[in-house]
């Protein structure tokens, strides 16, 4: 890492545009071990995301470092296309699902991975999970270890409140998938000092957003938050959600919401960066 790129990151740290953190997750490793141990459901939408990601990989990239491999689906699928893939995650449970080579690391410390040693650093649906210091460190590491390109996907302008849960055990409020930041297309324009942005685009079948006033009423008044039964509370690791205070008001909000015209949006953003 040369002094120039370090200076870039220090400057960027003070810019507010792409960072809007929500609840802190106390122990990431424990959270994701529990999260991946409780299984994952692969929807048709997820498969479409994986297929679109594989299609976007530049043909001159043969060795790939998949950072934050999660359920390993993409790494396993990619290995089948003849690419050489190494999967990185902080969760051993996640890595146990990967068939190829793996590396147990945090994204901000890819110790043992040499500078410019992989054609492509791939990072899908992971950056939104990181708290600030880890996020900045991960970008620095991607910039260091990628030789030709970096490809990332993140949720597109996520409505965070639509995915917030309330723990029935300790009462903490948390994002049910552990997201801590939301991204817009602009946030992805300049992330890596040694790489130029080739393109940024929204993709996936459009998803409806919950009507905002009704969402506020459902959560702030009815105290009915959201649930993913495969995600534990990051504070106390309980899987039990809090019961809604006014369930019939929450049901009314859901009913009204389902009958209103809704804003629709592609669920993901994808960005490709090429070495300068
Ligand atoms: Zn809790």
Image (spheres, helix red, strand yellow):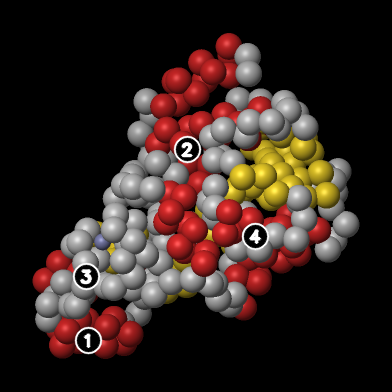
Q: Earlier in the sequence, mark 4 or mark 3?
A: 4
Which picture quadrant has residue 11?
top left
Q: Which residue is mark 2?
A: 135
Q: Earlier in the sequence, mark 2 or mark 4?
A: 4
Front position among marks 2 and 3: 3
Numbered badge on residue 168? 3
State the SS at label 1: helix
- Which residue is at 66% across, 63% downward? 97
Q: Residues within 10 Å of mark 1 (few under 14, many from 20)?
A: some
Task: Report if the CB atoms under discs 2 and 3 are less than 8 Å apart.
Answer: no
Numbered badge on residue 251? 1
Task: Report if the CB atoms under discs 4 and 3 are less than 8 Å apart.
Answer: no
* Label 3 beta carbon less than 8 Å to ligand 1: yes
Give the quadrant of the C terminus.
top right
State the SS at label 4: loop
- Which residue is at 77% across, 37% downward? 118
Front position among marks 1 and 4: 4
Mark 2 and mark 4: span between their CA atoms?
Answer: 24 Å
Task: Report if the CB atoms under discs 2 and 4 are less than 8 Å apart.
Answer: no
- Which residue is at 63% across, 18% downward? 1
Q: Residues within 10 Å of mark 2 (few under 14, many from 20)?
A: some
Q: Which residue is mark 4?
A: 96
The location of residue 202, given as percent across then percent down, is 56, 57
The location of residue 275, given as percent across then percent down, is 73, 31
Closest to the observer, 70 or 140: 70
State the SS at label 3: loop
Q: Earlier in the sequence, mark 2 or mark 3?
A: 2
Q: Earlier in the sequence, mark 1 or mark 3?
A: 3
Front position among marks 2 and 1: 2
Front position among marks 2 and 4: 4
Front position among marks 1 and 3: 3
Closest to the observer, 96 or 120: 96
């Amino acid at each position: 890492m040369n002094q120039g790129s370090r200076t870039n990151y220090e400057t960027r740290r003070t810019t507010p545009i792409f960072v809007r953190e929500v609840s802190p997750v106390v122990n990431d490793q424990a959270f994701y071990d529990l999260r991946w141990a409780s299984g994952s459901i692969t929807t048709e939408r997820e498969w479409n995301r994986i297929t679109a990601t594989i299609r976007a990989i530049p043909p001159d990239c043969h060795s790939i470092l998949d950072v934050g491999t999660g359920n390993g689906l993409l790494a396993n699928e990619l290995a089948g296309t003849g690419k050489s893939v190494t999967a990185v995650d902080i969760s051993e449970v996640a890595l146990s699902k990967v068939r190829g080579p793996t590396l147990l690391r945090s994204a901000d410390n890819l110790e043992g991975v040499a500078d410019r040693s992989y054609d492509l650093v791939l990072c899908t649906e992971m950056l939104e999970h990181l708290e600030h210091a880890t996020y900045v460190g991960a970008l620095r590491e991607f910039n260091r270890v990628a030789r030709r390109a970096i490809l990332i996907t993140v949720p597109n302008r996520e409505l965070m409140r639509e995915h917030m849960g309330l723990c029935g055990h300790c009462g903490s409020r948390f994002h049910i998938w552990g997201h801590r930041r939301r991204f817009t297309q602009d946030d992805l324009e300049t992330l890596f000092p040694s790489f130029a942005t080739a393109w940024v685009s929204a993709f996936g079948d459009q998803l409806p957003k919950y009507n905002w006033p009704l969402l506020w009423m459902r959560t702030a008044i009815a105290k009915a938050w959201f649930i993913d039964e495969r995600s534990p509370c990051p504070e106390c690791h309980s899987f039990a959600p809090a019961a809604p205070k006014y369930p019939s008001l929450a049901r009314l909000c859901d009913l009204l919401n389902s009958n209103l015209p809704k804003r629709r949006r592609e669920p993901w953003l994808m960005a490709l960066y090429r070495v300068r």
